[in-house]
Image (spheres, rainbow, N blue to C red):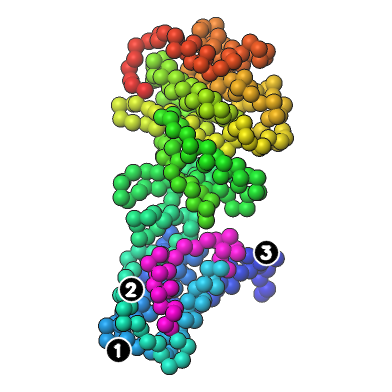
């Protein structure tokens, strides 16, 4: 029977690679470390077992004769070459495999003295290799993050995905605290990657309680770390809409507005305000902290990232806006009003009940931009004057 593997070189490469390792006997002691990876777990277990056998033998010989046998030396050289070639093949197929830094360092320390003939002389000052038996040494880079204080990689969990980036969460073992990682998708265009880097640069220089804090950019992976937020504004309101008091909604609205006012005062326009891009940190007793995120379409006075209608990817868009070339604070006011309306009603339609809050929302979205709020400060003043219509039953 002829099996058709298709014409995709990456698929053929993966098939041959997996077939090569499937022919090698598994070892339960190592297979159990890679049960989460059905596709490459067997391959990783085989290589892990081979590396451990060599490193344990080298540690023993370093304490005695300091001579590593000729056949073993050649075998380890071949294993290192095979490991490098296979990781390169996987990378070409779009799979980036990370090797534990302890083992990567061990390989780099062994390579200079390994010989193809006559055995290898282990240096007098050779430090013992730390043998890893009970945790994986291979991880798909897309599923892990390497922390400075941790020897092994930390697992990532996917929590969100946008047009050009994926967001993960992880728990830092040192602090027992959750953080997030935002990673640019593989293969995105140069312009979107430039936007992604600009997003980090902009957020890094901002410092305000209602803006998501970012920490470090990794050029190799095109990702950055940031504070973790529990929910989007959409989810937070939707799951609590029947029990949120007016006072709680007002405090959430003001936090949102203070954040927008801050970035406007910094000479920036967000241009992608939506219920997904406003995040919420949830604390005990129902207290929350609003955080603005997703600055990928942010506009600075010095930026030239404004071209066509196709770049208008914001979820809430001013119907009067035809492209980003003329985008201004009054256009941003429309999406601000839409978010405010959702905060106070839990409905994704502009509030029009004839009350004071409805008047505020309608002024944000007026079809004549001259009648809209011309600055967020004006809007903040009106929202601050709103009176609670029911008692406060929970902090926000």
Label 3 crowd bin: few (<14), some (14–19), many (20+), radius 10 Å: few
Q: Residue at x 66, y 37 (%)?
A: 305
* Left or right of 371 on screen, residue 254: left
Pointer 2 or 3: first along the chain: 3
| Most foreground residue, 267 or 363 | 267
Quadrant of the snapshot with the N terminus: bottom right
The residue under label 1 is 65
Tell me whether the residue at label 2 lies in contact with that at label 3, contact meaning CB atoms closer than 8 angstroms.
Answer: no
The residue under label 2 is 129
Q: Position of residue 23 (x, y in %)?
A: 50, 77
Pointer 1 or 3: first along the chain: 3
Q: Which mark is residue 232?
A: none
Label 1 crowd bin: few (<14), some (14–19), many (20+), radius 10 Å: few
* Comparing labels 2 and 3, the label whose residue is closer to the camera: 2
Q: Number of labelled discs?
A: 3
Label 2 crowd bin: few (<14), some (14–19), many (20+), radius 10 Å: some
* Left or right of 164 on screen, residue 67: left
How far apart are the alpha carbons under marks 1 and 3? 50 Å
Q: Which element is circle 2 on? A: loop
Q: Which element is circle 3 on? A: loop
Specify whether residue 260 is in view: no
Pointer 2 or 1: first along the chain: 1
Magenta span: 89-114
Q: Residue at x 42, y 74 (%)?
A: 107
The residue under label 3 is 8
Q: Position of residue 354 (x, y in %)?
A: 55, 6
Q: Is residue 111 above or below residue 319?
A: below
| Most foreground residue, 278 or 302 | 302
Extreme left residue here? Answer: 63
Q: Which element is circle 1 on? A: loop
């Amino acid at each position: 029977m002829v099996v058709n593997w298709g014409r995709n070189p990456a698929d053929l490469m993966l098939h041959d690679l997996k077939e090569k390792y499937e022919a090698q006997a598994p070892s339960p002691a190592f297979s159990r470390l890679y049960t989460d990876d059905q596709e490459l777990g067997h391959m990783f277990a085989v290589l892990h077992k081979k590396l451990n056998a060599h490193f344990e033998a080298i540690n023993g010989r370093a304490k005695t004769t300091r001579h590593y046998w000729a056949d073993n030396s050649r075998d380890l050289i071949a294993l290192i070459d095979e490991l490098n070639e296979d990781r390169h093949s996987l990378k070409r197929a779009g799979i980036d495999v990370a090797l534990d830094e302890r083992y990567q360092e061990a390989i780099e320390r062994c390579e200079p003295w390994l010989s193809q003939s006559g055995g290898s002389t282990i240096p007098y000052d050779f430090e013992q290799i730390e043998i890893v038996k009970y945790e994986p040494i291979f991880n798909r880079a897309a599923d892990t993050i390497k922390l400075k204080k941790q020897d092994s990689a930390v697992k990532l969990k996917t929590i969100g995905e946008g047009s050009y980036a994926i967001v993960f969460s992880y728990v830092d073992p040192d602090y027992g605290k959750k953080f997030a990682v935002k990673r640019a998708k593989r293969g995105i265009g140069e312009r979107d990657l430039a936007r992604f880097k600009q997003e980090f640069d902009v957020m890094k220089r901002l410092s305000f309680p209602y803006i998501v804090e970012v920490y470090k950019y990794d050029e190799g992976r095109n990702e950055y770390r940031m504070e973790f937020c529990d929910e989007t504004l959409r989810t937070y309101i939707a799951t609590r809409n029947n029990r949120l008091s007016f006072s709680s909604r007002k405090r959430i609205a003001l936090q949102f507005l203070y954040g927008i006012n801050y970035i406007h005062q910094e000479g920036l326009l967000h241009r992608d305000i939506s219920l997904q891009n406003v995040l919420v940190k949830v604390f005990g007793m129902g207290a929350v902290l609003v955080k603005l995120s997703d600055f990928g379409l942010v506009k600075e006075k010095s930026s030239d990232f404004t071209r066509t209608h196709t770049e208008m990817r914001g979820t809430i868009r001013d119907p009067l806006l035809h492209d980003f070339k003329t985008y201004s604070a009054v256009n941003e006011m429309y999406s601000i009003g839409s978010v405010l309306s959702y905060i106070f009603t839990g409905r994704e339609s502009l509030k029009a009940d004839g009350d004071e809050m409805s008047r505020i929302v309608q002024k944000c979205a007026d079809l004549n931009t001259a009648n809209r709020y011309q600055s967020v400060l004006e809007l903040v003043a009106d929202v601050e004057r709103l009176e609670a219509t029911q008692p406060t039953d929970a902090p926000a």
